[in-house]
Image (cartoon, helix red, strand yellow):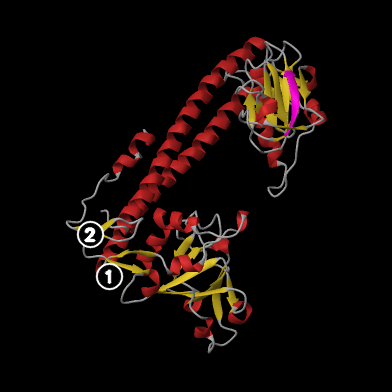
Amino acid sequence: RHLQSGAPERLPMSFPRYPQYKDSGVDWLGQVPAHWEVKRLRFLAELNPSKSEVAELERSTLVSFLPMDSVGDDGSLKLESEKTLAEVETGYTYFRDGDVTIAKITPCYENGKGAVMRGLTNGIGFGTTELIVARPQADALRSDYLHYLFISSEFRSLGESQMYGAGGQKRVPDSFVRDFATAFPPLPEQREIAGFLDRETAQIDALVAEQERLLELLKEKRQAVISHAVTKGLNPNAPLKPSGLAWLGDIPAHWNVRKLSHFFRASKGKNGQMLTKEFCGANPGEYPVYSGQTENSGVMGTWDQFEFDAGEEGVLFSTTVGSGKVMSLRHLFGRFSLSQNCMIIASSSPQCSVRFFFHHFQPLFDYERNLIPQHMQASFRMEDLYSYRIALPPLSEQRAIVAHLDAATAQFDALTAAVERALALLQERRTALISAAVTGQI
């Protein structure tokens, strides 16, 4: 019901075009409304205003301070931080209320990180040097309209093509912004367009927030269903007993707590080697490579050879605690290679279903992750796994739980995929709407 009522179709899907168009003379822009004027941005805005404007202020004057993480991808600002003018006048970028900023470094630029500066302490701010500042001329260009122009897909893609530098240090040159040519509507029309986009993007953003919340709820519900089934079983009336394990709590009275080493063997290669697509095999899947979540026959990296017998089943997972990468290798057999940060557990006893253990693994991962500070990373060792104990019902009950969870998780996964598709459509809609409005196509 939520998916149906919150779909993008609630938004208008088309808007009328202007009555008359003309050739803009700009290759990427094409036709524009006949009354819009094509100009370079340098004639409508001042770029990176001089700090000399605040030279007469007391050095103790408080101003807003904005590092890059205080400028949102959605045009928001975090204005909690303040510093004195003396602390920031050297080595930081200057701006004031009404200025429009955009990040120039990758990937912040591509993500549309930037904002209209509003609510600055004493109307003044300083921040990261990775911002370009544009100050619109009051009689020619509105700040809110310029912001939408800066985050339009055309502006971002054209700027990306002009980036200089290497790797994570690529930047858009100031000259690209200064010489950027497009068609500008009259000032009253800029106000109407900016107001229209404010309303439409707010509606889309509200729908996006609903879908993102739904994703979280689906994830929480999925984990709760799995955790309850593998620790309490499917019979709500079954008598319980203490398991003696903090992460398990009470378990059905007829279940037994057993060491993992009684039922499984773990495999993790010790002599990694560089594998290429040619080494893996000429045909996709001939010698598959696994990295904890997906198979890729063409990946290069340090991998370990692994043998898996026909008819076996196993669980492959990342040994990094909290990574969330757990993969069932149902019906897999033969020769393949395994990333060194992965491990496979295969059955060594008919008393425990591999699929039951597969579902059992996520609650164990979650418990271990909660014991580790968020800023730290830890890994499972083989000896750690062998020492773990799990609650084990009779084999027939394991199979019933597996069937229940396979069906339930398939449903959750289908719902999650539908929500993700809705999110993608909403984001596409938002991007297309902004671009169409600032280029005069609607």
- Disc 2/disc 1 C-alpha distance (Å): 19 Å
Task: Answer whether labels 2 and 1 touch (C-beta < 8 Å).
Answer: no
- Image location (x, y in percent) of residue 386: 80, 25
Looking at the picture, which amino acid does disc 2 mark?
A: Lys
Which of disc 1 and disc 2 is earlier in sequence?
A: 2
Q: Say what amino acid the circle numbered 1 marks.
A: Leu
In the rendering, which numbered label is found on residue 50?
none
Closer to the camera in the image, 428 or 159: 159
Give the farthest residue toward the bottom. Answer: 56
The label on residue 187 is: 1
Q: Secondary structure at mark 2?
A: strand
Q: Is residue 305 magenta?
A: yes
Q: Nearer the viewer, residue 79 or 442?
A: 442
Percent position of residue 3, x then y: 38, 35
The residue mark sitting in front, 2 or 1, is 2
> Label 2, on which residue?
22
Q: Is residue 61 above or below residue 399?
A: below
* Magenta segment includes 86: no
Q: Counting other residues with Cα less than 10 Å from the Cα at mark 1, is it few (<14), some (14-19), or many (20 or more)?
A: some
Answer few, some or many: residues within 10 Å of disc 2's Cα (few below 14, many 20 plus, some between 14 and 19).
few
* Residue appearing at x 49%, y 56% in the figure: 160
Q: Is residue 4 above or below residue 25?
A: above
Magenta segment, which residues?
302-307
Residue 292 place in picture, x, y as percent = 66, 31
Asked if residue 217 is positioned above or below residue 148 in the image, the reply reads above
Residue under the point 58% across and 80% down: 85
> Which element is circle 1 on?
helix
Can residue 240 be seen at all in this image of the molecule?
no
Q: Quadrant of residue 187?
A: bottom left
Of 37 and 200, nearer the camera is 37
- The location of residue 239, given as percent across then percent down, is 64, 19
Nearer to the camera, 128 or 8: 128
